[in-house]
Amino acid sequence: MFDDGSPIYRQIADRIKADVATGTLAPDSQIMSTNQYAAFYGINPATAAKAFAQLVNEGVLYKRRGVGMFIAPGARETLVGGRRIRYFDDVLDPALAEARTLGISGDDVLDFVKARLKREKQ
């Protein structure tokens, strides 16, 4: 699981955020404790705690004293909204710039996208 070279706590946080964004982790669902997470993945509990603290600060998780950590209501919408903005900025803007460089018109891009979406529906 932890193999992309970035700090492990960041990989943990990113994995939990991805699971929230896809709906795998639902609002108010409980996640493993830091000790359970550490034991399951064979990491230091402080590393898991750092990831969870980051997620609490970002509003993805909340803590119920004496009970554990839970997915915050509205976390999915917040994460998906942020990812949508980054998608347009990081993916579509460069793709459109490349299309312009290659002489591909906006109409051609739209036709291509519409055709792909139509094919996916079938």
Image (spheres, grey):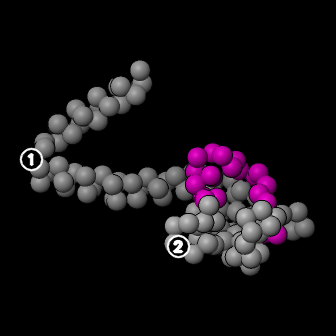
Q: Which residue was labeled with disc 1? A: 103
Amino acid marked by disc 1: Gly
Q: Residue furthest bottom?
A: 46
| Upstream in sequence: badge 2 or badge 1 | 2
Residue found at x 64% / y 65%: 12
Residue found at x 60% / y 66%: 2
Image side of residue 116 versus residue 10, left or right: left
Q: Determine whether 27 is above or below 69 in the image.
A: above
Q: Residue furthest top?
A: 122
Q: Which residue was labeled with disc 2? A: 6
Image side of residue 37 versus residue 108, left or right: right
Residue found at x 29% / y 35%: 113
Amino acid marked by disc 2: Ser
Q: Within the image, what quadrant is residue 97 found in?
A: bottom left
- Span of residues in magenta: 15-35
Image side of residue 81 versus residue 8, left or right: left
Question: Magenta stretch: residue 112 in it?
Answer: no
Front in this rendered view, residue 88 or 18: 18
Front in this rendered view, residue 25 or 47: 47
Q: Quadrant of the C terminus?
A: top left
